[in-house]
Image (cartoon, grey):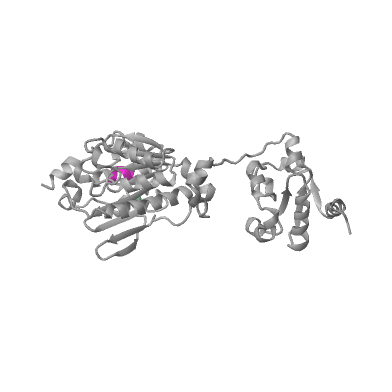
Amino acid sequence: MASGAELIRKVKEQIEEIDPKDVHELGRNGNGAVIVDVREQNEFDEAHLPGALHVPRSYLEQRIEGAVSDRSKRVILYCQSGNRSAFAAQTLKDLLGYEDVASMRGGITLWKDRGYEVEVPRRLTPEQRERYSRHLLVPEVGLEGQLKLLDAKVLLLGAGGLGSPAALYLAAAGVGTIGLVDNDVVDLSNLQRQVAHSNDRIGMPKVDSAEISIHEINPDVKVEKHPVRLGAENIMEIIRDYDVVVDGLDNFPTRYLLNDASVRLQIPVVSASILGFEGQLSVFHPYEGPCYRCLYPTPPPAELAPSCGAAGVLGVLPGVMGLLQSVEVIKLVTGKGDTMAGRLLLYDALGTTFTELKVRRDPDCPICSRDPDSIADDEMGVFPDYEAFCSGAG
Ligand SMILES: [Zn+2]
């Protein structure tokens, strides 16, 4: 029976060993080779080679095909000191049919001794690990998705019916920066649906009231307040730095303005609207799906625009629609799932029906058929301004 040391020596004779210097010369993208770390999760999390994939040796047989499906590809394995990766290399070569496998001599220890750079992955604090533990358990979110959420900047247009549930749940989900655009104050008649506000905050600016509620749920969230009305003069400055815009606007002309600005800046907009017992939802992802103007080349007649007066709405409905918007935001940020880009969802709360319509880009769209840089300032939101539009409604 061979001793452990003899066995290691024998295995190393049967496989190719490669010096860290030669791995380093391949560069971060491996120059056609795949670099795989076969250590345990906690070791990988401490530090690893830049660009390395992670397949722990204990899961090698089950997971290597997921990481490297092409068996003719050059695969360079490494571990802490070069022994575990030697065994792993033998397994790949002799048992799994990988044709071009090498083990890095001396492992990451020798790599570091040579002064080569390692990558230290970002980590969550113990408190964040606990706060987001249910996200970490979902493979589609996980650590990677949670870090993306924490880095994300999401702008809510309106801190009212749609913006309230979106603000609360996106804060709870760990969206790192939430911007709020609203120049209104909390009114008693808002509280039937605008759950980010409360009785004792009547009269307070909605952005301040929503900020309090956001921080009560998650003090980590950075809140950026814009207590202004969105207009042609400020829209580009306000939305420019955000990754996703959540449209809870209650008027059509500003929607056109928002559309034109978001196409120019190529920022996806998650849009919803509500009236009575009916809600609509879509995602306008510039150049990946239709824009708002592709769907609605012209605004509806002013007398049909519900935004101009006080329109009735079931109090729960904006909750449903605002949360559907929040789900779309999380998918856009994490890059997982299929968003509503190119689809329009109609929700009828009275009949409890969800209807989906396909919507397509208009090749002649006055805005998104063109290059974003060719859209001029004076073309943006070219529709009657809100007051003129609404006065027409009588
Ligand atoms: Zn368009």
- The residue depicted at 64 percent of the width and 55 percent of the height is 67
Measured from the top left, where is residue 31 in percent x and y? Answer: 68, 46
- The residue depicted at 18 percent of the width and 51 percent of the height is 311
Residue 296 visible within the image:
no
Measured from the top left, where is residue 24 in percent x and y? Answer: 72, 40
Q: In this view, does 334 lie to the left or right of 255?
A: right
In the image, residue 357 lies in the stretch drawn in magenta? no
Residue ranking furthest to the right: 1
In the image, residue 256 lies in the stretch drawn in magenta? yes
- The residue depicted at 69 percent of the width and 60 percent of the height is 61
Q: In this view, does 318 lie to the left or right of 77?
A: left
Q: Quadrant of the N terminus?
A: bottom right
Measured from the top left, where is residue 318 in percent x and y? Answer: 28, 52
Give the residues in magenta.
255-260
Measured from the top left, where is residue 180 in percent x and y? Answer: 33, 39
Using the image as rendered, state which of residue 231 and residue 331 is in the foreground: 331
Using the image as rendered, state which of residue 301 and residue 206 is in the foreground: 206
Residue ranking furthest to the left: 394
**Most common SS among magenta residues:** helix
Residue 244 visible within the image:
yes
Using the image as rendered, state which of residue 127 and residue 394 is in the foreground: 127
